[in-house]
Amino acid sequence: MIIDNLQSSLKIMRKKHPEAQNLIDIFTPILICEEELLEELKMKKPALSLKKQKEKVPYVDVKDFPVCSEKSHIICQKLLQSMKTALPHLNSIIEEIVPLIKPSTARRLCKEFIANKENHEELLEKFIEKNFAKDKLADETYFTNVYSVLELLLTRASHTLLARFARSLPVLEDIEETQICPVCSGKPNMSVIRFKEGQRELLCADCGTLWRYKRSKCHICGKEEDKNLEMTYADKNKNERALTCQACKNYILEIDLRDQEIDKENAHIYSLGMAYLDAIMQK
């Protein structure tokens, strides 16, 4: 059901955002692969008990996040195959990487990448220097392409592992408002408006968790004041906007899904259609 909804939503994205069609086409096979993996490797039992909800968030310390060699290997290998479809011009490099990602290697890379989500350059560079010929790496374009493929692979593999964990948890209830994800301490990359009453939720970039957050409150500095969050639109579509905090000048993309049928697990795809707006906000 989620996969069908995902495919349907991606088709809608292509029609609504022709300017982002290339980006959407690249990520379509990867996103579908992720969702298939999440279904295939779905946890039969909750990763944490209901009692854990009463404890202090986040639920898991990413520094000690458990990563299984077998499952991380399956995830990495299937994602690499999907990346061949997504990035045909990089197939030769992907083919070089495939045999390097053995079960123990997949586990180590994913575990270290998750533990150091914002500082993974050293991890990738060491792996490249150890496994690729120096004469090839002397070519700056070759090095950049290898680095980009590995970064995309581990970003999506880490997301799949964290989302698998997050989806096994009981429904998040009575969680106090927090500017970081109550499951994995990740940062939000989107704001989502759902339900008739216009409930606002933040979407974790790392595990896909949605949690409640006040509509008038900044996701970075926490300032809460009428008209503090300024809205910016890329076109006449008022359901897609960027919210900029006048106090700290940080922004976040926001999508209003009240008139759209979409599983909450697929809300993240709207960031593809809003890439143009994101680019405008970064200038």
Image (tube, rainbow, N blue to C red):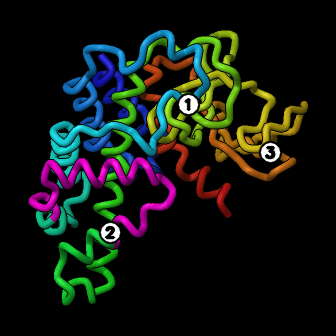
Label 1 Cα neighbours within 10 Å, binned few <14 / some 14-19 / many ≥20? some
Residue at horizontal 31 percent and vertical 80 percent from the top: 141
Q: How many marks?
A: 3
* Lateral position of residue 207 relative to residue 100, left or right: right
Q: Earlier in the sequence, mark 1 or mark 2?
A: 1
Front label number (2 vs 3): 2
Residue where numbered disc 3 is placed: 245
Furthest-right residue in this view: 226
* Lateral position of residue 257 relative to residue 147, left or right: right
Q: Position of residue 109 (x, y in %)?
A: 29, 54
Q: Residue 39, relative to residue 116: is it above or below?
A: above
Q: Which amino acid, by three-letter code, is at mark 1?
A: Pro
Front label number (3 vs 1): 1
Q: Earlier in the sequence, mark 3 or mark 1?
A: 1
Check residue 147 in the rendering and tell me which mark sits there, or answer none: 2
Q: Which residues are magenta?
A: 97-125
**Quadrant housing the C terminus:** bottom right
Q: Residue 80, relative to residue 219: is it above or below?
A: below
Residue at horizontal 40 percent and vertical 69 percent from the top: 122
Q: Which amino acid, by three-letter code, is at mark 3?
A: Cys
* Lateral position of residue 27 relative to residue 223, left or right: left
* Quadrant of the image occupied by residue 280: bottom right
Q: CA distance from mark 3 to mark 1?
A: 25 Å
Q: Position of residue 147 (x, y in %)?
A: 32, 68
Q: CA distance from mark 1 to mark 2?
A: 31 Å
Residue where numbered disc 1 is placed: 58
* Quadrant of the image occupied by residue 128: bottom left
Front-most of residues 30 and 63: 63
